[in-house]
């Protein structure tokens, strides 16, 4: 999602908050695989720990990033062999504030254990 599209979405949401029954989930749009296209991604076949850090401009709920979606994507793209308790030890999630929207990103660190 471009910065302009995100601004439009946020403006719409702010002006319609009283009319939205349950609020709207803001998910990072247009997930891409640019880093994977540039280099071959490492494949993990053993047990791993996963750390997810969301760098965000505006405060969000602590559960604002869908970890299930992220981890399922790692399995779908054959980066992880599976997402069972036998394959994944610990999953951590945190948020860091950044100065502007252009710096927003999500980093996933996978460590073999």
Image (cartoon, grey):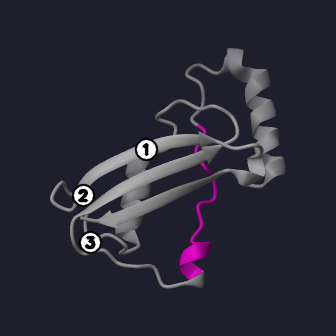
The first of marks 3 and 1 along the sequence is: 3
Element on which disc 1 rests: strand
Q: How crowded is mark 3: few (under 14 residues within 10 Å), some or many (20 or more)?
A: some
- Marks 2 and 1, Cα distance to the nearest angstrom? 14 Å
Please determine whether, in this image, residue 25 is positioned above or below residue 78. Answer: above
Using the image as rendered, state which of residue 60 and residue 96 is in the foreground.
96
Badge nearest the viewer, 3 or 1:
1
63 with respect to 45 (left or right)? right
Q: Pick whichever, 76 or 90, lies toward us.
A: 90
At 72% from the left and 52% from the top, the residue drawn is 103
Classify residue 6 by image quadrant: top right
Crowd band around label 2 with a 10 angstrom C-alpha radius: few (<14), some (14–19), many (20+): many
User: Magenta span has 4?
Assistant: no
Residues marked 2 and 1 touching at CB (< 8 Å): no
Disc 3 is placed on an element classified as: loop
Residue at image x 57%, y 81%?
Answer: 37
What is the CA distance from the residue labelled 3 to the residue labelled 1? 21 Å
Q: Mark 1 points at which residue?
A: 93
User: Image point 63% across, 31% down: which residue?
Assistant: 59
Q: Name the residue under label 2.
A: 88
Q: Does the magenta stretch include residue 33?
A: yes
Q: Are marks 2 and 3 in contact (CB under 8 Å)?
A: no
**Residue ranking furthest to the top:** 18
**Disc 2 versus disc 3: distance between alpha carbons?**
10 Å
Left or right: 25 in relation to 92: right
Give the magenta-colored segment's residue range. 26-37
Label placed on residue 81: 3
């Amino acid at each position: 999602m471009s910065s302009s599209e995100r601004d439009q979405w946020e403006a719409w949401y702010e002006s319609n908050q009283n009319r939205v029954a349950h609020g709207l989930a803001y998910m990072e749009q247009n997930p891409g695989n640019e880093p994977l296209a540039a280099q071959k991604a490492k494949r993990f076949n053993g047990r791993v720990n996963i750390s997810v850090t969301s760098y965000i401009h505006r405060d969000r709920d602590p559960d604002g990033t869908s970890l299930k979606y992220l981890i399922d994507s790692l399995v779908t793209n054959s980066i992880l062999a599976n997402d069972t308790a036998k394959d994944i030890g610990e999953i951590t999630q945190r948020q860091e504030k950044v100065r502007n929207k252009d710096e927003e990103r999500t980093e996933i660190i996978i460590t073999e254990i």
